[in-house]
Image: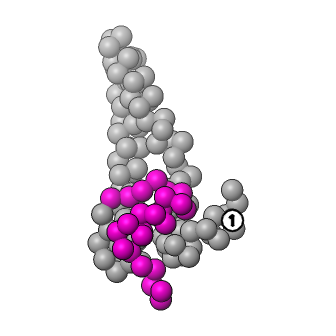
């Protein structure tokens, strides 16, 4: 999906700031998915022992922790921008596709500004 197609779907729903935050967050998803694999590799290297295994394992665990932290902080930023867009604190988040998002907004009674 190109940025133009993405913006056509999400700017009306999230506003320009929210759509930009979702675009950046979405682009990092593959890294976020890799974090359990990195953590598992790190734990395995730590279990093997030795100085090299300990150093490699610790490094992989730190990278995985950093990715998980970035994921959570990205969700918080996105949630804050959506709350700002709707003018009320939002609860939870749906799967971020347009159909789920629209159903979620309807269910919670969130109205787009100007509607």
Examine the image and state in which quarter residue 66 appears.
top left
- SS of the residue under disc 1: helix
The picture places residue 59, in percent across and down from the top left corner, at 39, 31
- Residue 85 shows in the view: yes
Q: What residue did someone put label 1 on?
A: 5
The answer to whether 22 is drawn above or below residue 50 in the figure is below
x%, y% of residue 60?
41, 30
User: In the displayed image of the protein, which residue is found farthest to the bottom?
Assistant: 114
| Residue that appears at 55% across and 62% down | 98
Q: Is residue 80 visible?
A: no
The residue at 51%/42% (across/down) is 31
The x and y percentages for residue 94 are 42, 56
- Label 1 environment density (alpha carbons within 10 Å; few <14, some 14–19, many ≥20): few
Q: Nearer the viewer, residue 77 or 101?
A: 101
Residue 14: x %, y % from top left: 49, 72
Residue drawn at (42%, 70%), measured in percent from left and top?
Answer: 106
Give the magenta range: 92-115
Answer with the quarter of the image where residue 67 lies.
top left
Which residue corresponds to the image point at 45% horizontal and 28% vertical from the top-left? 37
């Amino acid at each position: 999906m190109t940025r133009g197609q993405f913006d056509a779907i999400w700017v009306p729903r999230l506003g320009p700031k929210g759509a930009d935050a979702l675009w950046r967050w979405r682009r990092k998803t593959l890294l976020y998915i890799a974090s359990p694999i990195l953590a598992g590799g790190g734990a395995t290297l730590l279990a093997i022992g030795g100085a090299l295994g300990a150093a490699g394992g610790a490094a992989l665990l730190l990278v995985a922790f950093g990715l998980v932290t970035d994921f959570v902080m990205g969700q918080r930023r996105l949630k804050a921008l959506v709350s700002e867009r709707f003018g009320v604190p939002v609860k939870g988040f749906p799967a971020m596709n347009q159909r789920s998002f629209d159903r979620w907004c309807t269910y919670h009674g969130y109205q787009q500004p100007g509607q």
